Image: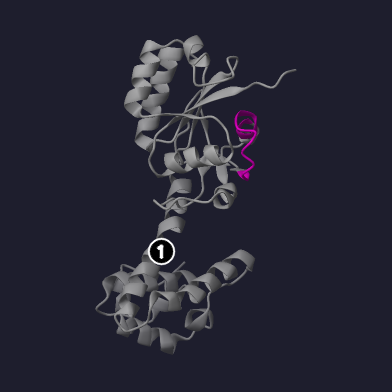
Amino acid sequence: MEETRYKIYLLGQGRLGRQLSRYFKYLNEECEILSRTDFLAKIKKSSSDQLQNSPSTNLPSALPLFLLAISDPDVPSVVQDIRECLGTNPVIVHFSASHKIPNAFGFHPLYSFTNRDLSLQELKTVPFVCDKGEKKFFHKFLPYIKNPVFELNSSKGPRYHALAVALANLPILVSQYASSCLNGEGLPKTALIPLLESVLNNFSVSSGEIASGPLGRKDSLTLDKHLKALKDDLFLKKIYSLAIEKEWPGYFAKEKHSLSSELNIPKETP
C-alpha cells in the first residue's frame, strides 16, 4: 500500500513557528506558512480538494496537514474553524501542552524556545510529548522528523505544563538574578557557566540525592548564616528557603527560625 503523503500548512510564526519553518527548510521539506488572517481567508474560500491541489505543492495527491504553532488559547477555535470549513479530511496537529481536542493530535515540544535561531543539530534533539497511544501518529504524519517522542501515562494537562514551565524558567530566572547580583561584586557572567554546567551534568547522571554544599551535608550553621545574609533579598530568600524545606523537611521547625512564619512554612512537616 502506498504511503499517505501530506501537504503541510504551518500556522503561526512566533518562536515555535519560526523554528519549525527553519526545520522544514533544513530538511528540504515543503511547508506553506500561513498567518492566522491568511489561513482564515484561505479556508473560507477553499474546499479540501482545492487545498490538496495548491500550486505550491508537487504532490497533488497529498492530504492537507495543518500544524498549529499558535498560542494555547487559540487552538480550540482554530481547530473548530478548520473542521467547519473543511470537514474531517485534513489532519490537524497542535503543539499545546494542555489541550486535548477531539479529532486533533497534540505533540508538545519539551524545549525552551527563545528568539535565538536553533541549528539543525539542536532542532533534532527537541523531544515531543504526547498522550498515551499517539506516538505512532507523529511518525506517520511527519516521518522525516526523527526527534524523540515520549508518551505520558495519561493525558497532558495543566500539571504537566506547569512542571515543564517551572523547569524551563526557574533555573534561568535564578541564574540571571544571581548573575546580576554577583556582577555587581565584580564576578563576570562567564565565571558562573562551569557551575551551571556542573549542575546540569549532575542532573543528567544522578538518580539519588543531588543537593550539594551545605544543603547536601545538612549544615544548619552555614544555612543559618545564608538566611541572615539574604534577609533583605525577598526573592532569593523565598526560593532558597523553599529549597531547604524541600531537601531538609523539618529544618524550619526550629523555634529560632522566624523565617518559617514569614514564608508561611509550617513548623512541622508531615
Left or right of residue 150, residue 76 in this image: left
Residue 2 in sight here: yes
Q: How many marks?
A: 1
Say if the magenta span includes residue 262.
no
Question: Residue visible at 36% across and 68% down?
Answer: 176
Question: In the rendering, at what x and y percent does residue 217 appear?
Answer: 53, 83
Give residue 140's position: percent from left, percent from top.
64, 29
The reply, left or right, for residue 136 in relation to residue 154 is: right
Q: Name the residue nearer the viewer: 171 or 41.
A: 41
Q: Nearer the viewer, residue 143 or 227?
A: 143
In magenta, the rendered stretch is 137-149
Identified at 48% across, 86% down, the residue is 219
Q: How is the rendered protein coloured?
A: one colour
Q: Position of residue 214 (x, y in %)?
A: 48, 83
Residue 18 horizontal/vertical position (percent):
43, 41
Q: Which residue is mark 1?
A: 172
Q: Residue at x 55, y 48 (%)?
A: 123
Say above or below: 205 vs 65: below
Q: Is 114 displayed left or right of 106 in the figure?
A: left
Judged from this view, the residue extending furthest toward the bottom is 221
Image point 41% across, 72% down: which residue? 268
- The one nearer the camera, 139 or 170, is 139
Please identify the quarter of the rendering in which residue 34 is found: top left
Which quadrant is home to the N terminus? top right
Quarter of the rendering containing residue 82: top left
Where 49 falls versus 134 (above or below)? above
The residue furthest left is 232
Amino acid at circle 1 = Ile
Which residue is more in the foreground, 92 or 257? 92
Q: Is residue 256 above or below residue 236?
A: below
Report helix, strand or loop for mark 1. helix
Whether residue 207 is visible, yes or no, is no
